[in-house]
Image: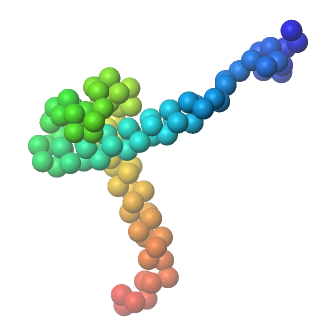
C-alpha cells in the first residue's frame, strides 16, 4: 500500500466516527465541572482540601480528575486561568465605557 507524506499508508489515520467529537465534548465538560468544583471546595475548605472531594463534587472519578490535573498546583493554575479569561472578557465588554467612570 502506498505511503502518504506522513509515513502512514493511505487511508490509515484517526477515524472521526460518531463517538470522536462526543468524547471530546464530554472531556471538556468534565474539565469545566472539575474547575468549578475545585473553585468551590478550595473556597470552603482551603487549598489543602482533599482532591477526592473535588472529584466527588464534580461528578467524575479520581482517575478523571488526575488525568486532567496531575496535582493541585495544576488545578489551581487552571482556576487562575479561568478567572483571568473571565476578567479579560469583562474588560472587553466594558471597553469604550471608561469615560463613564470619570
Residue drawn at x 67%, y 25% as measured from the top left: 15
Which quadrant would residue 67 be assigned to in this image?
top left
Residue drawn at x 41%, y 42% as measured from the top left: 29
**Residue 73 position in % (x across, y down):** 29, 35
Of the pair 3 and 57, the residue shown nearer to us: 57
**Residue 71 position in % (x across, y down):** 30, 29
Q: Is residue 20 visible?
A: yes
Q: Is residue 100 left or right of residue 40?
A: right
Q: Residue furthest top?
A: 1
Q: Is residue 7 visible?
A: no
Q: How is the image coloured?
A: rainbow
Q: Residue furthest right?
A: 2
Residue drawn at x 50%, y 32% as measured from the top left: 23
**Residue 36 position in % (x across, y down):** 29, 47
Of the pair 80 and 4, the residue shown nearer to us: 4
Which quadrant would residue 37 be assigned to in this image?
top left
Q: Is residue 41 left or right of residue 67?
A: left
Residue 11 drawn above or below residue 89: above
Which quadrant would residue 86 be assigned to in this image?
bottom left
- Quadrant that contains the C terminus: bottom left
Residue drawn at x 27%, y 25% as measured from the top left: 62
Amino acid at each position: 500500500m502506498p505511503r502518504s507524506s506522513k509515513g502512514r499508508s493511505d487511508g490509515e489515520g484517526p477515524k472521526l466516527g460518531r463517538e470522536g467529537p462526543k468524547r471530546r465534548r464530554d472531556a471538556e465538560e468534565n474539565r469545566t465541572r472539575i474547575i468549578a468544583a475545585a473553585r468551590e471546595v478550595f473556597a470552603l475548605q482551603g487549598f489543602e482540601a482533599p482532591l477526592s472531594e473535588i472529584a466527588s463534587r464534580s461528578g467524575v472519578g479520581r482517575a478523571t480528575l488526575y488525568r486532567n490535573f496531575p496535582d493541585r498546583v495544576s488545578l489551581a493554575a487552571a482556576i487562575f486561568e479561568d478567572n483571568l479569561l473571565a476578567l479579560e472578557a469583562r474588560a472587553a465588554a466594558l471597553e469604550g465605557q471608561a469615560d463613564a467612570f470619570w
